[in-house]
Amino acid sequence: MADSVNQKTIAKPSEPARRAVVTGASSGIGAETARTLAADGWGVVALARREDKLKALADSIKAKGGSCEYVVCDITDEGSTNDAVKTIVAEGPVKALVNCAGAAFGKDPVATANLDDWRGMYELNVLGTLRIIQKLLPTLKESEGTVLIVSSTAGIEPYEGGSGYCASKFAERVMARVLRLEQIGEPIRVIDVSPGLVQTEEFSLKRFGGDHSKADSVYEGVPDPLHANDIAESIRWAVDLPDTVDIDSIVIRPRAEGSYTKLYRKK
């Protein structure tokens, strides 16, 4: 994969960079989105819980001429999110909020699903997204900014074993749609990006509690699954459009995936 940072033009130091807050930036889609936006001249503020990962990300972006700061933040915690937003807003206006933080826990049927798995997915995918949006919405309006939510095709079509994750992603997509309706006439854009099968280093591994065999089986035989940079590029394109253009929804899948239950695998 080509180095996207080297393919973009970094904003000149004399030009104030548009600032984008990216949640879930310690890995996967969030980390790649931070790299892609920084390469496109954005000033990135990376949010996640793991400081070591955030520091490594910020250092790598800065080493290539990009702008990236980080704030340790757990969006499932009110105090942590309050402190993070105060720090961010004190440093200047925010032009975009890109909500990448999210996870799936377990793949059990409804009859035996673990309540703590459901609770964890709702706290992170739904309430965490709501919390950070509410706190940054005023400054985003001031800058005629964008709220972008990375949901999932799991929020479009349910599948067996995915009830908890699908429910949380349905809720996230509905949140984006309702916010869009409620903010008509306000200087704010609301965008939903719904990825299908994306192969990242942690998503399936976390879902299956660290079981590498189960995690690997998700992508086994699938030619050219999506990768984090594919989603990051769609995010970059959407937020780079004029402020008056709202991309309500992007559904992005690999060519091999027609739906969750229609997936081509090589024998």
Image (cartoon, rainbow, N blue to C red):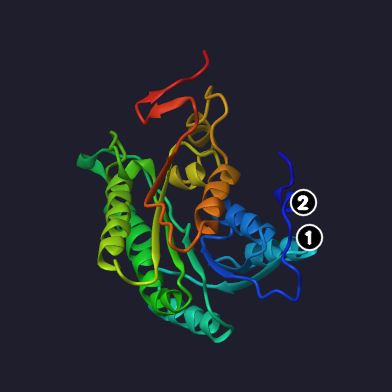
Left/right placement of residue 267 relative to residue 37 reads: left
For the residues labelled 2 and 1, the Cα–Cα distance comes to: 8 Å
Residue 115 appears in the figure: yes
* Residue 59, position as x, y percentages in the image: 74, 65
Residue at the image position 78 percent from the left and 60 percent from the top: 64
- Identify the image quadrant of residue 71: bottom right
* Residue 184, position as x, y percentages in the image: 29, 66
Q: Nearer the viewer, mark 2 or mark 1?
A: 2
Element at badge 1?
loop
Residue at the image position 64 percent from the left and 62 percent from the top: 53
Name the residue type under label 1.
Answer: Lys
Left/right placement of residue 16 relative to residue 72 reads: right
Image height check: is 244 above or below 263?
below
Label 2 packing within 10 angstroms: few (<14), some (14-19), many (20+): few
Q: Does the residue at mark 2 contact the one at mark 1 (Cβ under 8 Å)?
A: yes
Task: Name the residue nearer the viewer: 224 or 49.
Answer: 224
Where is mark 1, residue-wise?
64
Residue at the image position 26 percent from the left and 62 percent from the top: 181
Name the residue type under label 2.
Answer: Asn
